[in-house]
Image (spheres, rainbow, N blue to C red):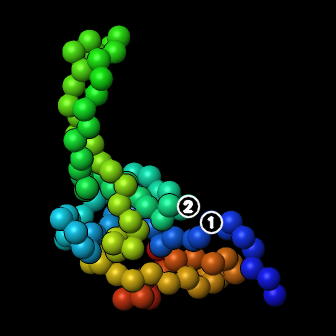
Amino acid sequence: MERKKNTIPKLHVKRGDTVKVLSGRDKSKTGEVVAVYPKDRTAIVKGVNMVTKHRKPDADNPNGSIVKLEAPIRVDKLMLMVGGEATRIGRKRNDDGKLQRYSKKTGEFI
């Protein structure tokens, strides 16, 4: 059986999830996922991986500015928070036969 090329991988995090950072300078911080980029396997988490951007002057801001904003972080550094605890995620079929995420710690569907 041949594999399909250029398929976008399924990720364990979705927009709106609360996640915990496992490694890096923001280790053990938690935040809400704002955006997910499956092709790059990255996500933007509110308040995590903050970077400083220098903005050029334009019509709205004639002096330019320095802005702090979130940069994408690799999803393999993120773990989903369920019930206040970080947990691993699995996929199994629910009663309707649809694949759904579940917490491996508690066994309940997310």
**Residue 110 numbered tag:** none
Question: Which of 91 and 36 lies nearest the eye of the viewer?
Answer: 36
Q: CA distance from mark 2 to mark 1?
A: 6 Å
Marks 2,1: beta carbons within 8 A: yes
Q: Position of residue 15 (x, y in %)?
A: 45, 57
Q: Secondary structure at mark 1?
A: loop
Question: Which of 94 and 75 lies nearest the eye of the viewer?
Answer: 75
Q: Position of residue 29 (x, y in %)?
A: 20, 65
Of callouts 2 and 1, the N-terminal one? 1
Establish if 72 lies above or below 19.
above
Q: Can the viewer see residue 84?
A: no
**Residue 39 numbered tag:** 2
**Residue 8 numbered tag:** 1
Task: Kindly identify the amino acid type of the residue bearing the numbered disc 1.
Answer: Ile
Establish if 10 lies above or below 54.
below
Q: Can the viewer see residue 26?
A: yes
Residue shown at 32% from the left, 67% from the top: 19
Q: Secondary structure at mark 2?
A: loop
Q: Label 2 crowding class (10 Å Cα cut-off): few <14, some 14-19, many 20+?
A: few
Task: Kindly identify the amino acid type of the residue bearing the numbered disc 2.
Answer: Lys
Residue shown at 81% from the left, 87% from the top: 1
Residue shown at 52% from the left, 77% from the top: 101
Establish if 103 lies above or below 65.
below
43 to the left or right of 40? left
Residue shown at 80% from the left, 82% from the top: 2
